Amino acid sequence: MKFDITFGPFTGAPRRITELALLAERLGYNTAWVTHDPLWDNSWVICGSIGLATNTIKVGPAIVNPYSSSLLEISMAATTLNNLTGGRAVLGFGPGSKKMLEEGGLKHTNLLSTMDQSIEYLKRSLSPSTSNLRQKTHTSIPIYFGCQSPKLIERVGRWQVGGLILLTPPSYGAEALRLIQKGAFKAGHQKVEGEIIASILCSINRDEQESMKGFASFIMHILEYLSPHQLEAHSLNAADIERIKRDYEEGGWEALPEKIFKLGAVGVEGCIKTIEELQAMGYGRVKVGSPLGQDKEEAIRLFATEVMPHFSE
């Protein structure tokens, strides 16, 4: 089992993220992903900083989109990062959060056809044999498509690229793999070629209640950005969410139903159990993300020393 880690606005300032990525490298994490959120620090700049500070960990944005950056700019940035790091760059690409884009004055247009055309362009551009760029990458850069909705998850199999599937809840992982396989078969592929990463939200602390408290604070902040389809599959519709928000305002994290904490992996034992379930589904790689923990460094260390060893080969 491989383990990736996500850094973003909730992790800290760019310099702090670089320091934490260096720690993650020392502790054996496979890849450091940096969220590319409109109106926040630019992920490419932070990825470059991480790349220079580290030696072995892979690094890339998760995820960039063709609405806030052109495909040419994305290709140039990914190629530059790959050459800067000696071939350690990865590209997380997708449509981006509709709500986050709207907050930046942008919007999704022609979503499915735009994604189809974008993946085709990027697969050409991120190959050493490309004619799209003058400065070419020395090694092929793997593309991981990040998404939540069923139609887009299915396309991961059709395109034969990697998948960076945000699972909220992680139990949706089995359905996500089924959709990817379905997309591959519909496109005439006998199997899925790209590596599929289970992306999960994680809150870890030696104190179980602190893990739950931290997760509750984060998840209530981002509920409106999550996939309605996945939430409904988890028996959480719009009315449920509004009621839960009111309960949280009045009673805090202890007033939340258990299903809210099942939207991610909470606590040491919760993380181990969740990853065991994902492994049984067929996942060989997991990306853990926000909130991690109140103390980010402690959370990164705790996950590496208490969770990762359970899955060592």
Image: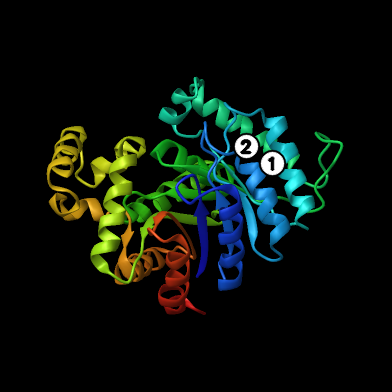
Q: Nearer the viewer, residue 214 or 120?
A: 214
Left or right: 272 as drawn, with respect to 30: left
Going by the numbered disc 2, the residue's amino acid type is Ile
Instruction: Count the labels in the image.
Output: 2
Going by the numbered disc 1, the residue's amino acid type is Lys
Image location (x, y in percent) of residue 253:
19, 52
From the viewer's perspective, is residue 311 above or below residue 8?
below
Label 2: few (<14), some (14–19) or many (≥20) C-alpha neighbours in 10 Å: many
Left or right: 142 as drawn, with respect to 284: right
* Residue at the image position 31 percent from the left and 51 percent from the top: 169
Left or right: 257 as drawn, with respect to 134: left
Image location (x, y in percent) of residue 299:
42, 65
From the viewer's perspective, is residue 258 above or below residue 269?
above
Image location (x, y in percent) of residue 85:
75, 56
- Mark 2 and mark 1 in contact? Answer it, CB < 8 Å: yes
Q: Which mark is residue 123?
A: 1
The residue tagged 2 is: 119
From the viewer's perspective, is residue 152 above or below residue 162?
above
Under circle 2, the secondary element is: helix
* Residue at the image position 57 percent from the left and 33 percent from the top: 65
Q: Nearer the viewer, residue 104 or 156?
A: 104
Image location (x, y in percent) of residue 198:
45, 56
* Residue at the image position 82 percent from the left and 35 percent from the top: 133
* Residue at the image position 79 percent from the left and 51 percent from the top: 83
Residue extending furthest toward the right: 134
| C-alpha span from label 2 to label 1 | 6 Å
